[in-house]
Image (cartoon, helix red, strand yellow):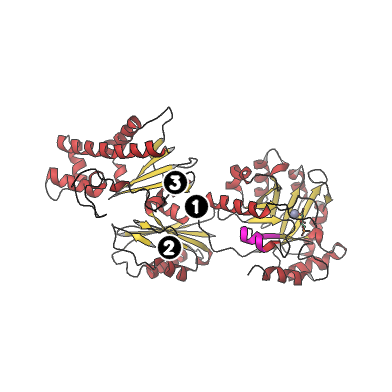
Amino acid sequence: MLRLGIDIGGTKINIGLFDKSHSLLASKKYYIKDITHLPSFIESSVLALCSENSLNHRDIVSCGIGIPGTVSDDGKHVIKAPNISILNDGLCNQLEELLKVPVRLVQDSRAAAWGEYLFGAGQGKSSVVCVTLGTGIGTGIVLDGKIYSGALGYAGELGHLPVHENGRACGCGKFGCLEKYCAGKGLDMTAAEILGEGNSCSELFSAAEEGNTRALEAIDDAIKMLGNALTAIINLMSPDCLLLSGGLSERRTLYSEPLMKYVRQSCYSAGKLPDIQFAQLGELSPLYGAAFLPMEEKRRKPQISASIMCADILNIGQALRDIEESGIEYIHCDIMDNHFVPNLMLPPELLNKFRDGTSLPFDIHIMADDPEGILDKLIIKKGDIVSVHYESVAHLQRVITKIKAREAKVCIALNPSTPIEMLTEVLNETDMVLAMTVNPGFSGQALVNGSFDKIKRLRAMLDQKGYHNIPIEVDGNCSFENVPKMYEAGAEIFVVGTSSVFKKGQSVKEGTEKLLSLLQ
Ligand code: DX5
Ligand code: ZN
C-alpha cells in the first residue's frame, strides 16, 4: 500500500511516496516552468519515481496534492491561487483518470499543518497552528484533530491581514497586507527602500548582522507586526501548539526566535502557554500532510476468512480443499479456553495438523486468558494473522512483540462492548483490527446491535490518525444480509461461518460466490 503526496509550489513540484508505516520511501523535486500539461507531467514523474525505486505504482491507493491557494471543500477544485498561474482546473479528475486512485487537493499550508500534526512537532497535540514563513505567509490550522478550513473555506489567511492603510499592493488584490511587510517578498521591498533598489531580504539581514540600525529597526517592526497577528490567533483560538516553518523561519537569531519570545510575552494566558516551536519536517511537511489527507482511498479487495469450526469437521480434508478451491484467502482458526469465552474449541495441536491439508495462511483467533502460552504451541507461518483480544491480557504490548517475532500479522480483537479508543496506544504496532460483531465463543449467533456504527467509527478513527493501512476484520454473523452493510461501514475481511459460506443446503463454493457477488 503506497500513499502519494505532491506539493506544488510556484516554481517547483515535490513528489513523495509513503508506505503503510508513514515512512517516506521515495521523493523527488522537479523545477518547472510550464504547468499547462500538469496531469501528464505528474503521471510520468510518479511512474518514473516508482520504477527508480522498484515500487509498484499499482500499490498507490490515494493521492493528496498541496497547492498554494484556496481549494473547494470537496478538495476537487482550485478556487484561488494568487501566487501561481492558475492550475488547470481539471487537475483532480484528469489525475484520477490517469492514476486510477482518489485525488484530493489541499491548501499547502494546511497540508503542512496536517503533516506536523500527524508526524512532526504537533504530534500528541489537539490543535496546531502552523505558520509557514516563505515568500508569503501560509497558515494551516488543525482544530481538535481535524483540518480546519472555516465555514467558507478561507480559514488561515493570516498573510492578508491588513496592517498598513493604503499600503503595498498584494497578490490577493488588496493593499497593506501583513505578508507584504513580514515575509520574503515584503522584506525584499523593505530592503529596497532602506538599502536601495536591487537589494533583497538577504541583504537586509546581512546589514542587520553588521549592526545597520535602520535594518534592525525594520526587522523589529516586522517582528512586532507578525507577533501581534500570532498573538491574536492564540488569544482567539487557544491552540496548544504554534509552529513556525518555511525558509524565513530559519533566520532564527534575528527573526524567528525574537518573534517567538515576543509572542510568548504578549499572548493572553491563565497559566499554560501554547507550545511555540519550529516545525520538524521542514519542506517535507506539506508532502506528509498531503499524502495522509483523510480521504477515502481505493478500496482494498475484500477478503474472506473461513471459520473452520463451522466446516464439515467429519470431512476436514475435503472441507479444507473446498475452501481453497473457492478462492477464500484465510482459514479462520478459533482457539477457545472455556474461560475467556464459555466454550472449548480447536486445540493448537489439532490446528497444527490442519496445516497438512491446506497451503492457505491461517487467521488464528485466540480467545484465551493465556495467549502467549497458546502461541508457543502453534505452528505459525509468515503471512498468518494472529488475533489477540485486548480484553484477555494485562500486557498487550508484550504479546504483540511475541506475535511479531513469529513474523505473523498482528491483529487486535475487540469484543462488542470494548471501546475502539482502547487501541490508541498500540496502533503503531498493529497490522489489523478484529471487530467482534457477536460475543465470541459460538457460531450461529445474531449480530450485536450497534455493530455497523462501531465499524464506521473505527474506520474513521483509523483514517483520522493516518492509519489507512490498517484493515478491519469482522467476526460473527457475517451473513449475506449483513456483509454488504459491514463492507459499507468499512470492514474488508469477513470471518464467515454458518451465516453464509457454511450455510446448510449449498456448497462452500456457492456460498462464497454469492457472498462476493454482494461486494462488487
Ligand atoms: C465466533 C466465531 C466465528 C463465527 C462463526 O466466535 O469466531 O466462528 O462467528 O460464524 P457465524 O457467526 O456465521 O456462525
Ligand atoms: Zn473467530
Q: From the viewer's perspective, is the residue at label 2 or at label 1 nearer?
A: 2
The picture places residue 230, in percent across and down from the top left corner, at: 33, 39
Residues under numbered marks 1 and 3 in contact, where contact means CB atoms less than 8 Å apart: no
- In which image quadrant can residue 265 be found? top left
Against 491, residue 132 (above or below) is above
Question: Which residue is denoted by mark 1 in the rendering?
Answer: 23
How far is the residue under mark 2 from the one under mark 1?
26 Å
The picture places residue 267, in percent across and down from the top left corner, at: 35, 32
Between 109 and 379, the one nearer to me in the picture: 109
Q: Mark 1 or 3 closer to N-term?
A: 1
Residue drawn at (38%, 54%) of the image: 107
The picture places residue 182, in percent across and down from the top left corner, at: 25, 43
Q: Which mark is residue 76?
A: 2
Q: Mark 2 or 1 closer to N-term?
A: 1
Number of marks in picture: 3
Position of 237 compared to 362: left or right?
A: left
Q: Secondary structure at mark 3?
A: strand
Residues under numbered marks 3 and 2 in contact, where contact means CB atoms less than 8 Å apart: no
In the image, residue 397 lies in the stretch drawn in magenta: no
**Quarter the C terminus occupies:** bottom right
**Quarter the N terminus occupies:** bottom right
The picture places residue 168, in percent across and down from the top left corner, at: 19, 49
Q: From the viewer's perspective, is the residue at label 1 or at label 3 nearer?
A: 3
Question: Which residue is denoted by mark 3 in the rendering?
Answer: 142
Name the residue type under label 1.
Answer: Ser
Q: Secondary structure at mark 2?
A: loop
Between 177 and 263, the one nearer to me in the picture: 177
Name the residue type under label 2.
Answer: Lys
Q: Secondary structure at mark 1?
A: loop
Q: Which mark is residue 109?
A: none
Residue drawn at (46%, 56%) of the image: 291
